[in-house]
Amino acid sequence: MSLMNPLQFFKSGDNEDGKRERLYGQIMFVNKSPEKGGYGFIKSPSVPFTRIFFHWTELIGYEFLELEKEMDVSFFAYESKDWTNDDGELIRGKGWIAQKVRVEQSTDKD
């Protein structure tokens, strides 16, 4: 089996002009566990009834360990597609993935 570029198996949430749109949503879950942490989920009206996965490496200009639920964020989203590897094995897509996640506003808990 040869290595393939995983980004070729994603389709972007392009608008009618073919340009990527920055979407908006809120953090709904963050896993900060040292063993298996470093990821979270976003909810967005742009992708209803779906939790959008993000990895800590996609966070721009904010410390991952400072993220909290309900923070407003913007991001680009991709939906993974099913694809077939060189051996003919079907690899299932895993839903929506956020890239270039930016905190737009922090929630104040005074």
Image (spheres, grey):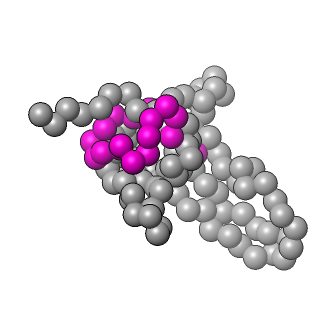
**Does 109 sit above or below residue 8?**
above
Residue sitting at x 40%, y 63%:
33
Q: Relative to residue 23, is residue 49 depicted above or below?
A: below
Using the image as rendered, state which of residue 40 and residue 37 is in the foreground.
Answer: 37
x, y (%) of residue 56? 51, 49
The N terminus lies in quadrant = bottom right
Tell me if residue 65 is in the magenta stretch: yes
Asked if residue 98 lies left or right of residue 66, the reply is: right
Which residue is situated farthest in the left direction here? 110
Magenta-tinted stretch:
59-78
Q: Residue at x 29, y 32 (%)?
A: 106
Q: Quadrant of the C terminus?
A: top left
Magenta stretch: includes residue 97? no
- Could you say which quadrant of the image residue 66 lies in? top left
Residue at 44 percent of width and 64 percent of height = 34
Q: How many marks?
A: 0
Left or right for 88, reference 28? right
User: In this orientation, which residue lies closer to the viewer: 41 or 77?
Assistant: 41
Q: Is residue 76 visible?
A: no
Q: Is residue 108 visible?
A: yes
Q: Estimate the x, y position of residue 2 in percent, counting from the top left.
A: 87, 67
**Image side of residue 31 versus residue 58, left or right:** left
Residue 58 position within the rendered picture, expressed as x and y whole percent measured from the top left:
55, 43
- Locate residue 27, reporting x and y percent: 34, 45
Seen as rendered, the residue at the extreme top is 17
Quadrant for residue 3, please give it: bottom right
What residue is at 43 percent from the left and 45 percent from the top? 64
